[in-house]
Image (cartoon, grey):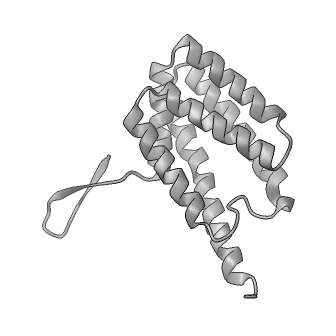
Amino acid sequence: MTSVVNSSCCAVPVMPTTRESAAISAAAAAERHTATDARILSERLEEYRTAASGAPARYADGRLHLAIAAAAHTSTLSDVLLSLERKMHITAPAHPWGHSAGWADLESRSLQDHERLIGAILARDVAEAHEVGRRHARINLELLENARRRARDEPQR
């Protein structure tokens, strides 16, 4: 949890952003993963790599991110990440992955991030896992911004 200074100059704890939480989770996974976690992370990455576009890729993506959170061995952080992800998907006015025409590009971009992220975690490179996790989580914000833009621009029925 991070904190901000309010108008009374007091530090007030605030919920970390998805980007911060994902970065912290990835760094913790790099530091704390077990041999079993490493096997599961590798399996989940391969599931994502071979998943068909669309719903199967989204499902594999979710399983991979859950495995990263589990490998961090920090239940509070895992709970925060799940809560933030749920809120992001619930508040999106349209499917956050957008129209199917853009899925292949998004999935390709995500695969590249996933390969770098899992590579850093398995190499126990905490700094790299943190940075890749932070950059990769930016995709969620972009998806939400795009979904809001589409909802705003599409004619009302």
Image height check: is 89 above or below 109?
below
Image height check: is 141 above or below 67?
below
Q: At 56% across and 31% down in the image, what residue appears?
A: 68
Q: Residue furthest top?
A: 35
User: In the rendered image, which quarter is residue 153 located in?
Assistant: bottom right
User: In the rendered image, which quarter is residue 144 located in?
Assistant: bottom right
Residue 147 position in % (x across, y down): 67, 69
155 on left or right of 148 = right
Q: At 69% across and 28% down in the image, what residue appears?
A: 44
Q: At 57% across and 38% down in the image, what residue appears?
A: 132
Residue nearest the viewer, comparing 29 with 58: 58
Residue 114 position in % (x across, y down): 67, 35
| Residue 108 visible | no
Residue 73 position in % (x across, y down): 44, 26
Q: At 75% across and 63% down in the image, what residue appears?
A: 98
60 on left or right of 74 = right
Quarter of the picture containing the C terminus is bottom right
